[in-house]
Amino acid sequence: MPIIEIKFKKIKIQNTEVKDNPDLIEEIIPAPLTSRERATLSSQSLHLYNKLGCLGVARFDIRQKSNGVFYFLENNTCPGIISYEHSDLPKQLKSMGISLKQFVEYMIIAGLNRPETKREYIC
């Protein structure tokens, strides 16, 4: 997935005001990172994803300090998929040419085929 950079226009942290007013931020997809930064973040994110036992999709919120060091703030194992305007995951999918419908279908099939959850379902 492409990494999103969020630049705050009038405040320094994301809060409910920012979530309710997208004019207070600028989102850049993909984030302007070097290939080394992107590879490092991808590797560290995958390591944490596996270490935490995540399944399906997860989002990590990360900050980069002015000295270039990245800090993982939190893991969201249920990122929103409400709309292309308000949720990060749909924006990332859209930038990759993947529709929400395609993504949801993929997640359902992947979940049903996961060995530890494979059962017979009655529909």
Image (cartoon, grey):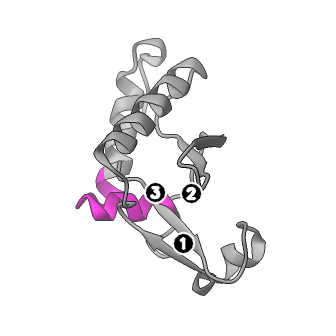
Going by the numbered disc 3, the residue's amino acid type is: Leu
As helix, strand or loop, the secondary structure at mark 2 comes to: loop
Residue 39 picture location, percent across and down: 34, 37
The 10 Å Cα crowd at callout 1, few under 14, some 14 to 19, many 20 or more, is some
Q: In the rendering, at what x and y percent does residue 26 appear?
A: 51, 77
Give the camera-side residue of 120 and 11. 11
Residue at x-position 40% and y-position 65%: 91
| Secondary structure that dominates the magenta span | helix
Specify the quadrant of the image occupied by residue 122: top left
Where residue 69 appears, as percent x and y from the top left, is: 57, 43
Q: Which residue is drawn at 59% across and 56% down?
A: 66
Dot label at residue 89: 3
Q: Which mark is residue 16?
A: none
Dot placed on the residue nearer the N-terminal end, 2 or 3: 2
Is residue 29 part of the magenta span, yes or no?
Answer: no
Q: Which residue is drawn at 37% across and 54% down?
A: 33
Q: In which quarter of the image is residue 94?
A: bottom left
Query: Where 114 sits versus 10, above or below?
Result: above
